[in-house]
Image (cartoon, rainbow, N blue to C red):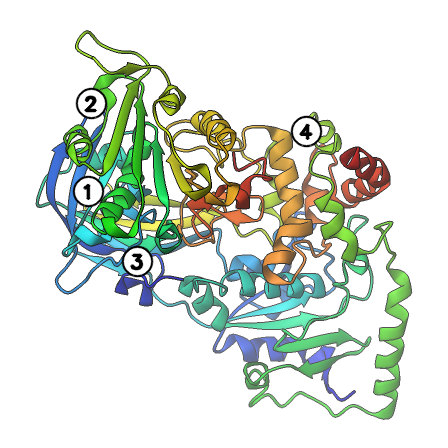
């Protein structure tokens, strides 16, 4: 292992250094929680943060993103302008895994230039997770507690300083002209080993089975009674989708100015849990039942996304469990399906 | 993956401006639009594919292409039912107005696989709009196909689409056409009843027949029962599925049913491919 050392005392200066040429998003305290926001001063950054309300996905897939600008007479019609350079500081490993999935979703098949342009202009500074974010996180079960090869820079908290790994040329560029880095000493390497070894036991496996079994479990769970049982309390509010780092569905809306001459077409996050999500103009709803919509979401997370991209659609961040007002969680749902699996298999063969 | 109109190189979501050359009212709710692409562009579609049509300021809607590639000549036709915001706005447009276009999108019908087969087309209502593209293509290449039978059902005589063309097809010696309506008016002299009542009027050699049916969800259940009951192999039954779509390119998630996307894997599907998927039918 070879890394550079970024003393915490030099961290604010480095953040300022990055800010010279980048919009910097970082975890900032907000009403007892944290969120990724564009910072104006290094002091705002709280690298001790647990989780954030919304995932850093919003930098690459903004809640509202302009796709086109047009004049309503059709005289002018152009794709939205290119984004500027952005650096996201302190991205947890689960969120890095989620971004890896987003990258695949938006490049497979038809390449989505709007996403790719933002992504290409985004530098990811990862942060090694050393203790669980919340009672809801289950990254260890989902295999997302170790960092994927996606970061541009990666920080590991050694106490007085960060071990800094460089993952790409884009990452290395954030260090050019910055004088505050140190060469690690033997005790720093020892400390880094300790930190990495000690972290694992702080996390627990919360699924009662291997995540690799999820696709096959979901494959036999389509007819489970559990979906109707969960649907009895699901509010179909879409909060789970809203906070999910791997949800990619969007709506597309036209908006015109008051003079009705010029307008913008934008996309905005959408939720497969909302009643009208699959309703066509004639009024037919192809997924009218709440249970069917719940099932669809869990199928996407546990099966479809894996089949389509090679990545599971859930990274175990626990945000949806935190956000759900009626305590429907992926851990409880999947464990319950797993407990019922022998019964389901029996019924489907009978 | 088919080639899209060239605006897609800049952005998947950037439409090409196209001109409405002709508008023909078909029924109370449906109009037929002839759309011309800018010079040098051609749609190069397959029967069964669709385009995303923009009315800038209102939105975008997926509309299946109603004319065949064999009759394109730089223009193509869309049959549009007034059903939502975008289609209502479209109904207000006149020749000379422009619309935005993205496409052609999705998978159409694999027409090469139909060569040498007897073809049974069973559209219901607006389902004739996408099927017309395939029927025209088949009739323009008639010698490559066996018997051609068209069974068309609508709720009411006033809702029958393309009646003149149906008449012309029925006058062709090598095409058999039967039409039915659920509720007749005083002038209706044809068959009365749902589309499945037409099946007893025709005979076909099931093992060599490809059946293509397009219609509302409720129709599929009964038509499929009929087709399977006649012994047509599951792999020879094709249909087209309507779904809500926003992007048309497999990203927005609205048209997903199980692991399939109607906009990418369809809208034309083989029955054998989707029969196990309860969200499909």
**Which sits in the foreground, A289 or B3?**
B3
Q: Residue B116, image x and y in percent? A: 35, 50
The residue tagged 2 is B28
Is the residue at mark 1 from the same chain as the one at mark 2?
Answer: no
Q: Which mark is residue A259?
A: 1
First in sequence: mark 1 or mark 4? 4
Disc 4 chain ID: A
Is the residue at mark 4 from the same chain as the one at mark 3?
Answer: no
Pointer 1: residues within 10 angstroms few (<14), some, or many (20+)? Answer: few
First in sequence: mark 3 or mark 2? 3
Is the residue at mark 1 from the same chain as the one at mark 3?
Answer: no
Say whether marks 1 and 4 touch (CB < 8 Å): no
Q: Label 1 to label 3, Cα distance in Å?
A: 23 Å
On the rendered structure, is B96 left or right of B47? left
The residue tagged 3 is B14
Pointer 3: residues within 10 angstroms few (<14), some, or many (20+)? Answer: many
Q: Label 1 to label 4, Cα distance in Å?
A: 45 Å
Q: Is residue A141 above or below residue A19?
A: above
Q: Is residue B181 above or below residue B109?
A: above
Secondary structure type for disc 4? helix
Q: Is residue A245 visible?
A: no
The residue tagged 4 is A231
For image coordinates 49% across by 65% down, the residue present is: A107
């Amino acid at each position: 292992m070879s890394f550079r050392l970024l003393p915490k005392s030099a961290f604010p200066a480095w953040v300022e250094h990055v800010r010279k040429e980048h919009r910097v998003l970082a975890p900032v305290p907000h009403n007892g929680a944290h969120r990724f926001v564009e910072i104006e001063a290094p002091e705002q950054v709280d690298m001790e943060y647990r989780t954030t309300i919304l995932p850093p996905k919003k930098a690459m897939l903004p809640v509202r993103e302009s796709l086109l600008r047009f004049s309503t007479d059709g005289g002018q019609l152009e794709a939205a302008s290119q984004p500027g350079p952005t650096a996201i500081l302190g991205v947890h490993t689960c969120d890095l895994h989620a971004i890896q999935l987003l990258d695949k979703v938006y490049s497979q098949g038809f390449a989505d230039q709007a996403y790719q342009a933002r992504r290409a202009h985004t530098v990811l500074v990862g942060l090694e997770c050393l203790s669980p974010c919340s009672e809801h996180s289950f990254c260890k079960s989902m295999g997302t507690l170790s960092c994927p090869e996606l970061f541009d820079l990666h920080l590991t908290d050694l106490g007085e300083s960060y071990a800094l790994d460089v993952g790409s040329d884009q990452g290395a560029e954030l260090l050019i002209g910055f004088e505050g880095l140190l060469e690690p000493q033997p005790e720093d390497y020892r400390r880094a080993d300790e930190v990495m070894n000690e972290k694992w036991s702080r996390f627990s496996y919360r699924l009662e089975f291997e995540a690799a079994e999820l696709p096959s479990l979901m494959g036999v769970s389509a007819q489970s009674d559990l979906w109707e049982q969960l649907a009895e309390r699901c509010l179909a509010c879409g909060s789970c989708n809203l906070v999910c780092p791997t949800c990619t569905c969007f709506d597309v809306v036209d908006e015109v100015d008051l003079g009705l001459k010029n307008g913008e077409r934008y996309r905005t996050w959408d939720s497969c849990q909302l009643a009208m999500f699959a309703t066509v103009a004639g009024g037919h709803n192809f997924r009218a039942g709440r249970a069917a919509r719940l099932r669809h979401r869990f199928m996407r997370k546990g099966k479809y996304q894996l089949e389509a991209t090679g990545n599971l659609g859930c990274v175990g961040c626990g945000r949806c469990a935190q956000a759900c007002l009626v305590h429907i969680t992926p851990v409880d749902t999947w464990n319950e399906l797993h407990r019922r699996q022998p019964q389901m298999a029996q019924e489907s063969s009978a | 993956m088919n080639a899209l109109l060239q605006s897609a190189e800049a952005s998947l979501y950037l439409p090409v401006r196209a001109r409405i050359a002709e508008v023909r009212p078909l029924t109370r709710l449906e109009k037929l639009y002839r759309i011309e692409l800018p010079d040098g562009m051609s749609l190069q579609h397959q029967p069964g594919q669709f385009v995303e049509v923009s009315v800038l300021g209102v939105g975008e809607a997926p509309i299946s292409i109603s004319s065949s590639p064999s009759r394109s000549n730089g223009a193509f036709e869309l049959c549009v039912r007034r059903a939502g915001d975008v289609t209502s706005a479209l109904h207000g447009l006149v020749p000379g107005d422009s619309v935005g276009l993205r496409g052609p999108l999705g998978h159409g019908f694999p027409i090469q696989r139909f060569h040498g087969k007897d073809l049974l087309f069973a559209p219901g209502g607006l389902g004739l709009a996408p099927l017309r593209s395939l029927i025209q293509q088949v009739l323009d290449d008639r010698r490559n196909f066996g018997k051609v039978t068209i069974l068309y059902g609508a709720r009411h005589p006033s809702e029958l689409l393309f009646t003149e063309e149906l008449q012309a097809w029925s006058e062709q010696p090598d095409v058999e056409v039967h039409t039915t309506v659920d509720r007749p008016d005083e002038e209706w002299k044809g068959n009365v009843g749902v589309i499945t009542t037409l099946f007893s009027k025709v005979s076909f050699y099931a093992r060599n027949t490809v059946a293509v049916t397009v219609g509302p969800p409720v129709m599929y259940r009964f038509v499929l029962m009929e087709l399977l009951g006649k012994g047509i192999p599951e792999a020879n039954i094709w249909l087209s599925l309507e779904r809500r779509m926003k992007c048309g390119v497999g990203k927005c998630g609205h048209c997903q049913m199980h692991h399939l996307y109607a906009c990418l894997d369809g809208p034309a599907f083989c029955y054998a491919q989707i029969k196990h998927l309860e969200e499909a039918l």
